[in-house]
Image (cartoon, grey):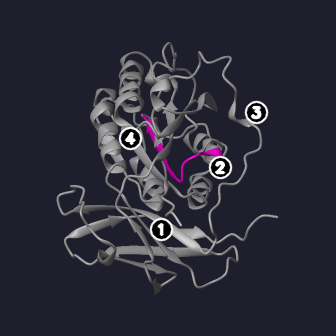
Amino acid sequence: MAIRPHTVVVLVPLVLGVWLLAPTLTALPAAQSFRTRLDLVQVTVSVTDASGRLVTGLTKDDFQIWEDGIEQDVTQFTDERVPVSLGVLLDASDSMRGQPVLDATKALDRFVGELLFPEDEAFVATFNHSPRLAARWKRPTSALVNVLDGLQPSGGTAIYDALAETARLFERRNNIRAAFVLISDGTDTASDRTLYQALDVVRRSDAFVYAIAIDPPDARASTRVNPEALREITALSGGYTEVVRSAADLGPATARIADELNKQYTIGYSSKRPPDGSWRPLRVRVRRPDHLVRARRGYYADPPSR
């Protein structure tokens, strides 16, 4: 049985208003659940040293995992790169006008065109006060280069709504592992959903979520990006939030995400408890005190749908 890696989500701020013909996310057909064996729990893990450098070369015996405080036997392990289904969510609000959106588009084109693998797939969505799908799942991801050319930013910033609406696209993915990348330069000013509701969406997903927060020194205090809220979202999933000073820094930031996707581990264990719909906290550690581990903090043990 192949190990199931986690989903990653990348959120990137970009412009939205020009996509008048792009389908809204609410117009998408109902998704089919993406499931594997219910008693096999698979967890994607990133390991870094004290300096923040990614650690490779570990073995199954280096890892320990606990479910709801009870240590489990690691029965599945791989350190090989598994194809990823990548969701890109781009901030297209008014604050991204001008050079920021040009820099963001350039970084996105390099990310999907050069840094991912031929077997990977990706979709691209944008958001301002509402999310909009710019391109459905594409493989190879190089087919997404230039998909956002001509975008014009406008409107407010509804991060929580956009995250909740686009997360369900992962239910139709083709690869086991998934990631979500979010890029934004502002705080949420337009969502109907709360941060707590956005966190619940992340809890119900196996996606690794990354966020890049653009925080220029001259940003207005009222609309300035909120890294603390983004960190709550990404830490729950096993991902991370990086704060950069300008959209020109998006290229190196997305390259670091791509590098991590190439160097993750996937471990698995057979849960001793039947699926009952409960939330089960997870904790993963490495038997080396100088290494730090990031992984999702739990999962819902949902029974199969009928």
Give the residue at mark 3: 27
Given residues 152 and 72, the one toward you in this image is 72
Give the residue at mark 4: 212
Query: Which mark is nearer the camera, 2 or 4?
Result: 2
Contact, CB < 8 Å: mark 4 with mark 3?
Answer: no
Please state the horizontal and vertical placement of residue 117, each as a whole percent of the image.
40, 38
How much space separates mark 1 and mark 4, taking CA atoms? Answer: 21 Å
User: Of helix, strand and loop, which one carries label 4?
Assistant: strand
Give the residue at mark 1: 297
Q: Residues within 10 Å of mark 4 (few under 14, many from 20)?
A: many
Q: Amino acid at mark 2?
A: Glu
Q: Amino acid at mark 3?
A: Ala
Q: Amino acid at mark 1?
A: Arg
Please state the horizontal and vertical placement of residue 247, each as a whole percent of the image.
34, 28
Query: Which mark is nearer the camera, 1 or 4?
Result: 1
Q: Amino acid at mark 4?
A: Ile
Query: Which mark is nearer the camera, 2 or 3?
Result: 2
How much space separates mark 2 and mark 4, taking CA atoms? Answer: 24 Å
Residue 179 included in the magenta stretch of the image: yes
Please state the horizontal and vertical placement of residue 250, each as a whole percent of the image.
33, 32
